[in-house]
Image: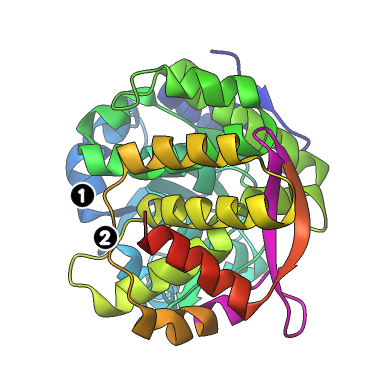
Amino acid sequence: MNTILSDNYSVYFDNSLDKLVDFVKKGNYSKFFILTDENTGEHCLPLLTSKLKDFNNYDLIEVSSGEESKNIDFCVGVWKMLIDFGADRKSLMINLGGGVITDMGGFAASTYKRGIDFVQVPTTLLSQVDASVGGKTGIDVDGIKNIIGTFTMPKAVFIAHEFLQSLPPRQILSGLAEMLKHGLIVDCNYWNQLKNSDLKNPSVELVHRSVEIKNKITIEDPHEKGIRKALNFGHTIGHAVETYSLLHDENSLSHGEAVAIGMICESYLAHKKTGLSSDELHEIVKVLTDLYPKYTIKEESFDELFLNMKKDKKNVGDEINCTLLTHIGQFSIDNVCTANELCESLRYYINL
Protein backbone atom coordinates (compact mmCIF):
# COMPACT_ATOMS: atom_id res chain seq x y z
CA MET A 1 0.00 0.00 0.00
CA ASN A 2 1.18 3.51 -0.80
CA THR A 3 1.84 6.04 1.93
CA ILE A 4 -0.91 8.67 2.04
CA LEU A 5 0.45 12.20 2.27
CA SER A 6 -1.21 15.32 3.62
CA ASP A 7 0.02 18.87 4.08
CA ASN A 8 1.06 18.19 7.67
CA TYR A 9 1.71 14.47 8.13
CA SER A 10 1.88 11.08 6.43
CA VAL A 11 -0.18 7.92 6.95
CA TYR A 12 2.04 4.83 6.66
CA PHE A 13 0.78 1.34 5.74
CA ASP A 14 3.67 -0.87 4.59
CA ASN A 15 6.00 -1.96 7.44
CA SER A 16 4.42 0.82 9.47
CA LEU A 17 5.90 -0.13 12.86
CA ASP A 18 9.41 -0.20 11.40
CA LYS A 19 8.71 3.25 9.99
CA LEU A 20 7.57 4.38 13.44
CA VAL A 21 10.96 3.33 14.83
CA ASP A 22 12.69 5.32 12.09
CA PHE A 23 10.46 8.32 12.87
CA VAL A 24 11.38 8.23 16.57
CA LYS A 25 15.10 7.96 15.78
CA LYS A 26 15.02 10.90 13.37
CA GLY A 27 12.94 13.03 15.75
CA ASN A 28 15.67 13.31 18.40
CA TYR A 29 13.04 13.34 21.14
CA SER A 30 14.19 13.79 24.74
CA LYS A 31 11.69 11.13 25.86
CA PHE A 32 8.66 9.43 24.48
CA PHE A 33 5.55 7.97 26.05
CA ILE A 34 3.21 5.21 24.93
CA LEU A 35 -0.42 5.73 25.91
CA THR A 36 -2.46 2.55 25.90
CA ASP A 37 -5.26 0.68 27.68
CA GLU A 38 -5.32 -2.80 29.21
CA ASN A 39 -6.66 -4.47 26.05
CA THR A 40 -4.13 -2.88 23.73
CA GLY A 41 -1.45 -3.46 26.35
CA GLU A 42 -2.14 -7.18 26.17
CA HIS A 43 -2.69 -7.67 22.44
CA CYS A 44 -0.75 -4.91 20.63
CA LEU A 45 1.89 -3.40 22.91
CA PRO A 46 4.24 -6.44 22.81
CA LEU A 47 4.56 -6.14 19.03
CA LEU A 48 5.40 -2.44 19.31
CA THR A 49 7.85 -2.77 22.21
CA SER A 50 9.67 -5.59 20.39
CA LYS A 51 10.51 -2.97 17.75
CA LEU A 52 11.70 -0.50 20.40
CA LYS A 53 14.22 -2.74 22.15
CA ASP A 54 17.09 -0.37 21.30
CA PHE A 55 15.39 2.52 23.15
CA ASN A 56 15.50 3.16 26.90
CA ASN A 57 14.01 6.66 27.02
CA TYR A 58 10.31 5.85 27.11
CA ASP A 59 7.58 5.18 29.67
CA LEU A 60 4.15 3.57 29.50
CA ILE A 61 0.90 5.25 30.53
CA GLU A 62 -2.16 2.99 30.77
CA VAL A 63 -5.79 4.06 31.16
CA SER A 64 -8.94 1.95 31.43
CA SER A 65 -10.54 0.91 28.15
CA GLY A 66 -13.94 2.14 26.99
CA GLU A 67 -15.71 5.40 26.16
CA GLU A 68 -16.30 5.97 29.89
CA SER A 69 -12.58 6.75 30.22
CA LYS A 70 -12.61 9.53 27.63
CA ASN A 71 -13.23 12.31 30.11
CA ILE A 72 -11.43 15.14 31.86
CA ASP A 73 -10.59 13.08 34.97
CA PHE A 74 -8.65 10.48 32.99
CA CYS A 75 -7.06 13.27 30.96
CA VAL A 76 -5.85 14.94 34.17
CA GLY A 77 -4.39 11.57 35.12
CA VAL A 78 -2.44 11.46 31.85
CA TRP A 79 -1.15 15.01 32.36
CA LYS A 80 -0.03 14.15 35.92
CA MET A 81 1.82 11.08 34.65
CA LEU A 82 3.58 13.22 32.06
CA ILE A 83 4.61 15.63 34.81
CA ASP A 84 5.79 12.78 37.08
CA PHE A 85 7.80 11.24 34.23
CA GLY A 86 9.44 14.59 33.44
CA ALA A 87 7.95 15.16 30.00
CA ASP A 88 9.24 18.34 28.38
CA ARG A 89 8.36 20.12 25.15
CA LYS A 90 10.74 17.88 23.20
CA SER A 91 8.80 14.78 24.25
CA LEU A 92 6.64 12.60 21.99
CA MET A 93 3.34 10.87 22.77
CA ILE A 94 2.62 7.61 20.93
CA ASN A 95 -1.11 6.87 21.11
CA LEU A 96 -1.47 3.10 20.74
CA GLY A 97 -5.11 2.08 20.76
CA GLY A 98 -8.61 2.65 19.49
CA GLY A 99 -10.59 5.85 19.13
CA VAL A 100 -10.68 6.58 22.86
CA ILE A 101 -6.87 6.47 23.06
CA THR A 102 -6.25 8.43 19.86
CA ASP A 103 -8.88 11.08 20.70
CA MET A 104 -7.87 11.56 24.34
CA GLY A 105 -4.14 11.04 23.77
CA GLY A 106 -4.16 13.63 21.01
CA PHE A 107 -6.02 16.06 23.26
CA ALA A 108 -3.70 15.46 26.22
CA ALA A 109 -0.61 15.95 24.03
CA SER A 110 -1.99 19.01 22.22
CA THR A 111 -2.59 20.80 25.54
CA TYR A 112 0.32 19.61 27.71
CA LYS A 113 2.77 22.52 27.99
CA ARG A 114 0.69 24.08 25.17
CA GLY A 115 1.43 21.16 22.91
CA ILE A 116 3.91 18.34 22.42
CA ASP A 117 4.30 16.14 19.36
CA PHE A 118 2.15 13.04 19.06
CA VAL A 119 1.64 10.21 16.60
CA GLN A 120 -1.30 7.87 16.19
CA VAL A 121 -0.93 4.08 16.06
CA PRO A 122 -4.57 2.99 15.68
CA THR A 123 -5.29 -0.61 16.64
CA THR A 124 -9.02 -0.93 15.85
CA LEU A 125 -10.71 -0.69 12.48
CA LEU A 126 -12.71 2.31 13.70
CA SER A 127 -9.63 4.23 14.76
CA GLN A 128 -7.72 3.30 11.59
CA VAL A 129 -10.37 4.61 9.19
CA ASP A 130 -11.73 7.44 11.33
CA ALA A 131 -10.41 8.65 14.67
CA SER A 132 -6.67 8.67 13.90
CA VAL A 133 -6.94 10.70 10.67
CA GLY A 134 -7.81 14.36 10.34
CA GLY A 135 -6.43 16.01 13.46
CA LYS A 136 -9.53 16.01 15.65
CA THR A 137 -8.80 15.40 19.33
CA GLY A 138 -11.36 15.34 22.10
CA ILE A 139 -12.95 14.17 25.30
CA ASP A 140 -16.56 13.76 26.45
CA VAL A 141 -18.28 15.88 29.11
CA ASP A 142 -21.62 14.95 30.69
CA GLY A 143 -22.01 12.19 28.13
CA ILE A 144 -21.70 14.60 25.19
CA LYS A 145 -19.21 13.08 22.77
CA ASN A 146 -16.09 15.06 21.87
CA ILE A 147 -17.57 18.34 23.12
CA ILE A 148 -14.13 19.49 24.34
CA GLY A 149 -11.17 19.17 22.00
CA THR A 150 -8.77 20.71 19.53
CA PHE A 151 -7.91 20.56 15.85
CA THR A 152 -4.28 19.43 16.14
CA MET A 153 -2.60 17.33 13.47
CA PRO A 154 -0.48 14.35 14.50
CA LYS A 155 3.09 14.20 13.27
CA ALA A 156 2.30 10.89 11.56
CA VAL A 157 -0.14 7.96 11.55
CA PHE A 158 1.08 4.34 11.43
CA ILE A 159 -1.51 1.76 10.38
CA ALA A 160 -0.61 -1.88 11.04
CA HIS A 161 -3.21 -4.20 9.52
CA GLU A 162 -2.05 -7.08 11.71
CA PHE A 163 -3.58 -5.40 14.78
CA LEU A 164 -7.05 -6.08 13.35
CA GLN A 165 -6.53 -9.83 13.75
CA SER A 166 -7.04 -9.49 17.52
CA LEU A 167 -10.41 -7.74 17.22
CA PRO A 168 -13.76 -9.41 17.97
CA PRO A 169 -16.38 -9.27 15.15
CA ARG A 170 -18.37 -6.53 16.89
CA GLN A 171 -15.35 -4.21 16.82
CA ILE A 172 -14.85 -4.86 13.12
CA LEU A 173 -18.49 -3.95 12.49
CA SER A 174 -18.06 -0.74 14.46
CA GLY A 175 -15.30 0.46 12.14
CA LEU A 176 -17.13 -0.81 9.09
CA ALA A 177 -19.92 1.73 9.65
CA GLU A 178 -17.48 4.57 9.01
CA MET A 179 -16.19 2.84 5.86
CA LEU A 180 -19.73 2.45 4.54
CA LYS A 181 -20.31 6.12 5.34
CA HIS A 182 -17.29 7.09 3.23
CA GLY A 183 -18.79 5.32 0.23
CA LEU A 184 -22.23 6.79 0.81
CA ILE A 185 -21.05 10.38 0.96
CA VAL A 186 -18.51 10.57 -1.88
CA ASP A 187 -17.83 7.31 -3.72
CA CYS A 188 -20.64 5.15 -5.08
CA ASN A 189 -18.10 2.71 -6.60
CA TYR A 190 -16.50 2.20 -3.18
CA TRP A 191 -19.93 1.63 -1.63
CA ASN A 192 -20.61 -1.06 -4.25
CA GLN A 193 -17.17 -2.58 -3.67
CA LEU A 194 -17.84 -2.79 0.06
CA LYS A 195 -21.22 -4.43 -0.51
CA ASN A 196 -19.53 -7.19 -2.49
CA SER A 197 -16.59 -7.73 -0.11
CA ASP A 198 -15.97 -9.90 2.92
CA LEU A 199 -17.07 -7.34 5.47
CA LYS A 200 -16.15 -9.54 8.42
CA ASN A 201 -12.51 -9.24 7.38
CA PRO A 202 -11.97 -5.97 5.48
CA SER A 203 -8.84 -6.01 3.33
CA VAL A 204 -5.99 -3.55 3.74
CA GLU A 205 -6.96 -2.16 0.31
CA LEU A 206 -10.42 -1.21 1.62
CA VAL A 207 -8.93 0.36 4.74
CA HIS A 208 -6.51 2.29 2.54
CA ARG A 209 -9.38 3.62 0.39
CA SER A 210 -11.32 4.81 3.44
CA VAL A 211 -8.27 6.60 4.84
CA GLU A 212 -7.71 8.13 1.40
CA ILE A 213 -11.27 9.50 1.32
CA LYS A 214 -11.16 10.94 4.83
CA ASN A 215 -7.67 12.37 4.34
CA LYS A 216 -8.67 14.14 1.11
CA ILE A 217 -11.68 15.76 2.79
CA THR A 218 -9.80 16.87 5.90
CA ILE A 219 -6.93 18.36 3.87
CA GLU A 220 -9.43 20.47 1.96
CA ASP A 221 -11.26 21.58 5.10
CA PRO A 222 -9.12 21.03 8.24
CA HIS A 223 -11.37 23.02 10.61
CA GLU A 224 -14.78 21.78 9.45
CA LYS A 225 -16.09 24.98 7.88
CA GLY A 226 -17.49 23.31 4.74
CA ILE A 227 -16.91 19.98 2.97
CA ARG A 228 -15.60 18.24 6.12
CA LYS A 229 -19.16 18.38 7.44
CA ALA A 230 -19.87 15.57 4.97
CA LEU A 231 -18.16 13.23 7.44
CA ASN A 232 -20.96 13.96 9.92
CA PHE A 233 -23.50 11.97 7.89
CA GLY A 234 -25.26 9.64 10.33
CA HIS A 235 -23.68 11.31 13.35
CA THR A 236 -26.27 13.89 14.42
CA ILE A 237 -28.77 11.17 15.29
CA GLY A 238 -26.09 8.51 15.78
CA HIS A 239 -24.25 10.43 18.50
CA ALA A 240 -27.54 11.17 20.27
CA VAL A 241 -28.46 7.48 20.30
CA GLU A 242 -24.93 6.51 21.37
CA THR A 243 -25.01 8.99 24.27
CA TYR A 244 -28.43 7.70 25.36
CA SER A 245 -27.20 4.11 25.21
CA LEU A 246 -24.05 4.89 27.23
CA LEU A 247 -26.19 6.43 29.97
CA HIS A 248 -28.96 3.84 30.08
CA ASP A 249 -27.75 0.46 28.78
CA GLU A 250 -25.45 -1.92 30.61
CA ASN A 251 -24.31 -3.30 27.24
CA SER A 252 -24.19 0.00 25.39
CA LEU A 253 -24.04 0.45 21.63
CA SER A 254 -20.68 0.71 19.93
CA HIS A 255 -19.97 3.89 17.98
CA GLY A 256 -20.47 2.12 14.66
CA GLU A 257 -23.75 0.52 15.73
CA ALA A 258 -25.08 3.94 16.72
CA VAL A 259 -23.85 5.55 13.50
CA ALA A 260 -25.57 2.80 11.48
CA ILE A 261 -28.85 3.78 13.16
CA GLY A 262 -28.06 7.41 12.43
CA MET A 263 -27.37 6.67 8.76
CA ILE A 264 -30.69 4.86 8.41
CA CYS A 265 -32.61 7.74 10.02
CA GLU A 266 -30.72 10.42 8.11
CA SER A 267 -31.15 8.52 4.82
CA TYR A 268 -34.89 8.63 5.50
CA LEU A 269 -34.60 12.39 6.06
CA ALA A 270 -32.61 12.64 2.83
CA HIS A 271 -35.43 10.86 0.97
CA LYS A 272 -37.87 13.42 2.40
CA LYS A 273 -35.73 16.55 2.06
CA THR A 274 -32.82 16.29 -0.42
CA GLY A 275 -33.95 13.96 -3.19
CA LEU A 276 -32.51 10.56 -2.21
CA SER A 277 -34.59 8.08 -4.22
CA SER A 278 -36.73 5.43 -2.57
CA ASP A 279 -34.65 2.71 -4.30
CA GLU A 280 -31.43 4.14 -2.85
CA LEU A 281 -33.04 4.48 0.59
CA HIS A 282 -34.13 0.85 0.54
CA GLU A 283 -30.68 -0.26 -0.64
CA ILE A 284 -28.97 1.58 2.23
CA VAL A 285 -31.44 0.26 4.78
CA LYS A 286 -31.07 -3.33 3.58
CA VAL A 287 -27.27 -3.26 3.73
CA LEU A 288 -27.24 -1.73 7.22
CA THR A 289 -30.01 -3.83 8.74
CA ASP A 290 -28.40 -7.00 7.40
CA LEU A 291 -25.15 -6.07 9.17
CA TYR A 292 -26.28 -4.47 12.43
CA PRO A 293 -28.72 -5.81 15.03
CA LYS A 294 -31.91 -3.87 15.71
CA TYR A 295 -31.76 -1.56 18.72
CA THR A 296 -34.90 -0.86 20.74
CA ILE A 297 -35.81 2.83 20.74
CA LYS A 298 -38.97 3.86 22.54
CA GLU A 299 -41.04 7.00 21.99
CA GLU A 300 -40.52 7.88 25.67
CA SER A 301 -36.83 8.45 24.90
CA PHE A 302 -37.45 10.98 22.10
CA ASP A 303 -37.25 14.05 24.38
CA GLU A 304 -33.87 12.96 25.73
CA LEU A 305 -32.60 12.05 22.26
CA PHE A 306 -33.71 15.43 20.92
CA LEU A 307 -31.97 17.18 23.82
CA ASN A 308 -28.78 15.27 22.95
CA MET A 309 -29.11 16.40 19.32
CA LYS A 310 -29.51 20.04 20.42
CA LYS A 311 -26.15 19.79 22.22
CA ASP A 312 -24.40 18.63 19.05
CA LYS A 313 -21.33 20.77 18.35
CA LYS A 314 -22.28 21.14 14.65
CA ASN A 315 -25.41 23.14 15.42
CA VAL A 316 -25.78 26.90 15.01
CA GLY A 317 -28.06 28.53 17.56
CA ASP A 318 -31.17 26.43 18.16
CA GLU A 319 -31.11 24.85 14.71
CA ILE A 320 -30.14 21.18 14.36
CA ASN A 321 -27.99 20.64 11.28
CA CYS A 322 -27.66 17.34 9.44
CA THR A 323 -25.53 16.21 6.53
CA LEU A 324 -27.85 14.38 4.13
CA LEU A 325 -27.42 12.45 0.88
CA THR A 326 -28.76 13.60 -2.48
CA HIS A 327 -27.69 10.31 -4.10
CA ILE A 328 -25.44 7.45 -3.00
CA GLY A 329 -22.01 9.02 -3.37
CA GLN A 330 -23.24 12.64 -3.12
CA PHE A 331 -24.04 14.77 -0.08
CA SER A 332 -25.60 18.04 1.05
CA ILE A 333 -24.41 19.84 4.21
CA ASP A 334 -26.16 22.22 6.62
CA ASN A 335 -29.68 20.86 6.32
CA VAL A 336 -31.81 22.19 9.17
CA CYS A 337 -34.07 19.46 10.54
CA THR A 338 -37.02 20.13 12.83
CA ALA A 339 -37.95 18.16 15.93
CA ASN A 340 -40.91 16.66 14.08
CA GLU A 341 -38.71 15.53 11.18
CA LEU A 342 -36.12 13.99 13.49
CA CYS A 343 -38.80 12.15 15.47
CA GLU A 344 -40.36 10.94 12.22
CA SER A 345 -37.01 9.49 11.17
CA LEU A 346 -36.69 7.67 14.50
CA ARG A 347 -40.17 6.21 14.02
CA TYR A 348 -39.11 5.05 10.58
CA TYR A 349 -36.25 3.12 12.19
CA ILE A 350 -38.49 1.74 14.95
CA ASN A 351 -40.97 0.39 12.38
CA LEU A 352 -38.44 -1.35 10.13
**Image disc number at residue 297:** none
Q: Are marks 2 and 1 in contact (CB under 8 Å)?
A: yes
Q: Is residue 187 left or right of residue 197?
A: right
Q: Is residue 211 left or right of residue 176?
A: right
| Residue bounds of the magenta highlight | 308-330
69 above or below 123? below
Local SS, label 1: helix
Q: Is residue 254 left or right of residue 340?
A: left
102 above or below 162? below
- As for residue 316 lying within the magenta part, the answer is yes
Local SS, label 2: loop
Residue 205 is at least partly visible in this image? yes
* Residue at the top extreme of this rendering: 1
**Residue shown at 68% from the left, 32% from the top:** 329
- Say whether disc 2 or disc 1 marks the residue closer to the N-terminus: 1
Q: Residues within 10 Å of mark 2 (few under 14, many from 20)?
A: some
The percent coordinates of residue 340 (x first, y second) are: 60, 77
Check disc 1 and report the residue beneath it. 39
Q: CA distance from mark 2 to mark 1?
A: 7 Å
Q: Which image quadrant is residue 295 in?
A: bottom left
262 above or below 299? above
The percent coordinates of residue 301 (x first, y second) are: 38, 82
**Residue shown at 53% from the left, 85% from the top:** 307
Residue 13 is at least partly visible in this image? no
Q: Amino acid at mark 1?
A: Asn
Check disc 2 and report the residue beneath it. 65
